[in-house]
Image (cartoon, rainbow, N blue to C red):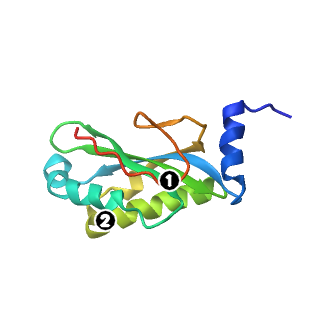
């Protein structure tokens, strides 16, 4: 049997009572129309992401924007999610993303979305802050 680092065991123990594990999820989705189309809807997307409807989301933030020229913007959101398994963590994150983008879902290239899901370790940062149990406010970062 593989030994896990102590901090990983602590993170599992903290959420085991509810039968869930805390996952760190990064979802990257390109915007259609580039910078010009993203600028006017960015603030509304951030506001919607700041109030995720699912209590399983411990933290959520828009982690980065990658711009390449005037016609390309790729947005990455990062979340700490309490879920039963990896598929559940990804589904919760996807639902939060589509909920935040609901008014402008056609503005995203959903077929080019990419995700990374892994168990969170105690002390894993979400944009420089440690993941904590319970619900934390979204971080605001202007980029």
- The image shows residue 61, relative to residue 40, as above or below, that is above
Disc 2 designates what residue? 105
x, y percentage for residue 78? 43, 46
**Nearest the camera: 40 or 105?**
40
x, y percentage for residue 55? 51, 63
Tell me if 3 is positioned left or right of 101 in this view. right
Residue at the image position 31 percent from the left and 44 percent from the top: 74
**Residue 73 numbered mark, or none:** none
**Quadrant housing residue 111:** bottom left
The extreme right residue here reads 1
Element class at badge 2: helix
Tell me if 6 is positioned left or right of 94 in this view. right
**Nearest the camera: 94 or 130?**
130
- The image shows residue 136, relative to residue 1, as above or below, that is below
**Nearest the camera: 71 or 41?**
41
Say how many tags the image has: 2
Disc 1 designates what residue? 58
**Quadrant housing residue 84:** bottom right
x, y percentage for residue 122? 60, 37
Q: Earlier in the sequence, mark 2 or mark 1?
A: 1
Residue at the image position 14 percent from the left and 56 percent from the top: 40
The C terminus sits in image quarter: top left
The N terminus sits in image quarter: top right
């Amino acid at each position: 049997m593989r030994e896990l680092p102590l901090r990983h065991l602590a993170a599992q123990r903290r959420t085991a009572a509810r039968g869930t594990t805390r996952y760190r999820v990064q979802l990257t989705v390109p915007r259609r129309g580039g910078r010009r189309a993203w600028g006017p809807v960015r603030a509304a997307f951030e506001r919607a992401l700041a109030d995720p409807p699912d209590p399983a989301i411990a933290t959520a933030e828009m982690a980065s924007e990658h711009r390449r020229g005037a016609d390309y913007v790729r947005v990455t959101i990062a979340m700490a999610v309490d879920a039963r398994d990896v598929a559940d963590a990804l589904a919760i994150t996807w639902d939060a993303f589509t909920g935040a983008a609901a008014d402008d879902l056609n503005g995203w290239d959903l077929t080019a979305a990419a995700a990374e899901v892994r168990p969170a370790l105690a002390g894993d940062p979400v944009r420089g802050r440690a993941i904590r149990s319970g619900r934390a406010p979204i971080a605001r970062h202007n980029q």
